[in-house]
C-alpha cells in the first residue's frame, strides 16, 4: 500500500511540473555575449557545451546553443555588436535568477599579443552565474539576456613550476538584461596625453593598446586615489571598457556593458598592460574620477576631456 501511495505522489508531482511547463510556456529568450579584451591577449577561444536558465520556481530550462561558438575570437565581441550564443522558445514566463553554463576541461585557449604564445584557458566545469538585477520572460515576447565577459578584469594569468595557463575567474561573472542602463562617451586626445601614455598603438580591433575606462561603485571614496584591478577587493573596478578610436581623428569612444542601476565613478587609465587581477600594482596611473549615475534603463553619456 505504501508503495502505491509513494508512486501516486511521484506521479502527482511530475504531473504538476508538466502542468507548470505546459501552461506557462509563453515566452522566448535570447542569450548574448560581449567581451572586454585583456590588454596583453590577442585571442581567446572558449567552448560552451550547455546553457540553462533557472526559473524562480526552481525549474531549469536548457537553451539551444548556436553553432561554431568555439571558433569565434572572444577578444573581439564589442558591446555594440554582441554575439548571440543561445536561445530558447516557449519557456515559462516569469522571473529567472541564474544562468548555468557548462565547459569542457580545458575550456579553450588564449594567445599572447607580444609573443604569440598559446596557453590553455580554464574555468570551472559548471558555473552558476547570478542574474542581477531582475530578469523576466514575458508572454508573447522575446527577452534578451547578456553575459558580459570582462577579460581585462577577470582573465588571470597563472604561472608556477608545474603549469602556465589563463583562467576566467567564475566568481566575477554575472548576467544582466540587455536593456539595463548603460554608460558611454567620448575621450579626447588631451585626456590621454594628461596620463603620459606610453603607447599610442592601435590593436587590430582599432582599440588603443592598454587604454581603458574603469568603473567603480560609488562608496564615497576619494576621486584621486582610485584602486587598480584586484580580484575580490571591494575598492577595485566593477567593470572596464576598452577605448576605441573613432573615424574623426584625435578622439576615442568607450561603451560599457549594461550595469545595475546606481551611483558609480569613472576613471581613465593607459596602464592596462600593467594591471593584473592577481596582485596590486601601485604604478597603474588613473585619472581623477568622475561621479555618474546609471539609470534602470537607457543610456548615460559622459565625455572625458
Image (cartoon, helix red, strand yellow):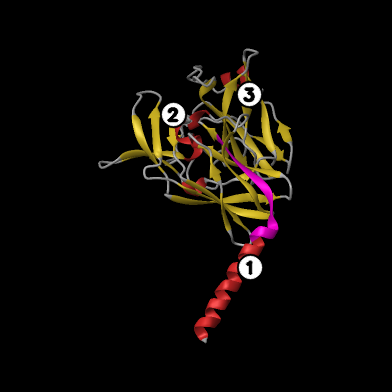
Q: Secondary structure at mark 3?
A: strand
What range is drawn magenta here? 21-34
Q: CA distance from mark 3 to mark 2?
A: 22 Å
Q: Quadrant of the C terminus?
A: top right
Circle on res. 253: 3
Is residue 148 found left or right of 68 in the rendered image?
A: right
- Image-quadrant location for residue 8: bottom right
The earlier-in-sequence mark between 2 and 1 is 1
Do the residues bearing badges 3 and 2 touch, measured as CB atoms within 8 Å? no
- Judging depth in this view, the residue of 210 and 4 nearest the camera is 4
Furthest residue in direction left, as rendered: 161
Q: Which mark is on residue 43?
A: 2
Q: How many marks?
A: 3
Tell which tag, 3 or 2, sits nearer the viewer.
Answer: 2
Q: Nearer the viewer, mark 1 or mark 3?
A: 1
Q: Nearer the viewer, mark 2 or mark 1?
A: 1
Residue 12 spot, x, y in % from top left:
60, 73
Amino acid at each position: 500500500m505504501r508503495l502505491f501511495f509513494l508512486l501516486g505522489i511521484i506521479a502527482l508531482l511530475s504531473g504538476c511540473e508538466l502542468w507548470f511547463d505546459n501552461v506557462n510556456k509563453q515566452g522566448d529568450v535570447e542569450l548574448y555575449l560581449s567581451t572586454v579584451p585583456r590588454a596583453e591577449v590577442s585571442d581567446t577561444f572558449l567552448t560552451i557545451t550547455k546553457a540553462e536558465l533557472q526559473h524562480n520556481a526552481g525549474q531549469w530550462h536548457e537553451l539551444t546553443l548556436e553553432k561554431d561558438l568555439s571558433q569565434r575570437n572572444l577578444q573581439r565581441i564589442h558591446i555594440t555588436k554582441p554575439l548571440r550564443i543561445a536561445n530558447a522558445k516557449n519557456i515559462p514566463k516569469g522571473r529567472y535568477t541564474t544562468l548555468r553554463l557548462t565547459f569542457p576541461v580545458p575550456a579553450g585557449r588564449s594567445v599572447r599579443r607580444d609573443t604569440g604564445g598559446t596557453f590553455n584557458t580554464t574555468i570551472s566545469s559548471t558555473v552558476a552565474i547570478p542574474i542581477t538585477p531582475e530578469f523576466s520572460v514575458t508572454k508573447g515576447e522575446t527577452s534578451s539576456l547578456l553575459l558580459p565577459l570582462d577579460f581585462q578584469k577577470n582573465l588571470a594569468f597563472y604561472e608556477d613550476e608545474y603549469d602556465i595557463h589563463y583562467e576566467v575567474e567564475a566568481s566575477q561573472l554575472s548576467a544582466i538584461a540587455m536593456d539595463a542602463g548603460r554608460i558611454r562617451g567620448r575621450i579626447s586626445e588631451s585626456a590621454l596625453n594628461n596620463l603620459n601614455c606610453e603607447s599610442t598603438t592601435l590593436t587590430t580591433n582599432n582599440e588603443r593598446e592598454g587604454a581603458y575606462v574603469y568603473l567603480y561603485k560609488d562608496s564615497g571614496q576619494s576621486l584621486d586615489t582610485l584602486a587598480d584591478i584586484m580580484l575580490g577587493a571591494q575598492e577595485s573596478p566593477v567593470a572596464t571598457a576598452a577605448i576605441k578610436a573613432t573615424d574623426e581623428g584625435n578622439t576615442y569612444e568607450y561603451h560599457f556593458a549594461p550595469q545595475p542601476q546606481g551611483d558609480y565613478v569613472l576613471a581613465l587609465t593607459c596602464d592596462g598592460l600593467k594591471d593584473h587581477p592577481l596582485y596590486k600594482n601601485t604604478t597603474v596611473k588613473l585619472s581623477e574620477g568622475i561621479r555618474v549615475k546609471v539609470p534602470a534603463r537607457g543610456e548615460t553619456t559622459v565625455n572625458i576631456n
